[in-house]
Amino acid sequence: MATPFLIGVGMTVTGTAGRFSIKAAQKYKPSRTIRSVYYKGGFDNEMSKREAALILGLIERDINRTKIKEAYRKTLMLNHPDKGGSPYLASKIIEAKNFLEKVVRK
């Protein structure tokens, strides 16, 4: 008579522990959404310093002629139309470089 009772208690404890474990795992499980490091949004009508820095991958506060030149070269080489890149993106990269060179007169 005690054996069926002990089996019932054991199953109840096991079920409760399993339920608790599943809920804890669901609570602390990382979300399934993929976070992107890329900027989401299109281009503005007129180029701004922020947009130009985003296009060239520069930090807006830390821009000088050398960094503009290096970032421009690297970005354009990756997106050049002769190597399968978009002519529109290449024009935006050139526009960003020209805009930043006008803004940063060092």
Image: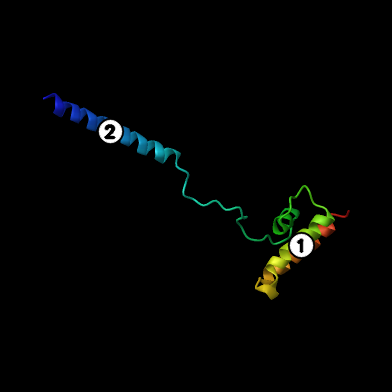
Q: Which residue matches tag 1? A: 72
Return the residue nearer the eye: 9 or 97. 9
Left or right: where does residue 104 sit relative to residue 1?
A: right
| Residue 75 lies in quadrant | bottom right
Residue in the image at 15% along x and 27% along y? 3
Left or right: where does residue 13 sit relative to residue 78?
A: left
Q: Which residue matches tag 2? A: 14
* 6 versus 70 height, above or below: above
* 59 versus 96 height, above or below: above
Residue that sits furthest to the front in the current view = 3
Residue 4 percent across, percent down from the top left = 14, 29
Element assignment for label 2: helix
Residue in the image at 47% along x and 46% along y? 31
Instruction: Give the amino acid at mark 2.
Output: Thr
| Residue 52 lies in quadrant | bottom right
Return the residue nearer the eye: 25 or 48. 25
**Of tags 1 and 2, which is closer to the observer?**
2
Number of marks drawn:
2
Q: Give neighbour class at mark 1: few <14, some 14-19, many 20+ (Cα, 10 Å).
A: many
Among the two numbered marks 1 and 2 on one chain, the one whose residue lies closer to the N terminus: 2
Residue in the image at 40% along x and 41% along y? 26
Query: What colour scheme has been applied to the protein in the rendered image?
Result: rainbow
Residue that sits furthest to the left in the current view = 1
Instruction: Give the amino acid at mark 1.
Output: Tyr
Marks 1 and 2, Cα distance to the nearest angstrom?
Answer: 62 Å
Quadrant in which the N terminus is drawn:
top left
Return the residue nearer the eye: 7 or 104. 7
Residue 19 percent across, percent down from the top left = 32, 36
Residue 11 percent across, percent down from the top left = 23, 33
Residue 83 percent across, percent down from the top left = 68, 73
* 74 versus 64 height, above or below: below
Residue in the image at 73% along x and 61% along y? 46
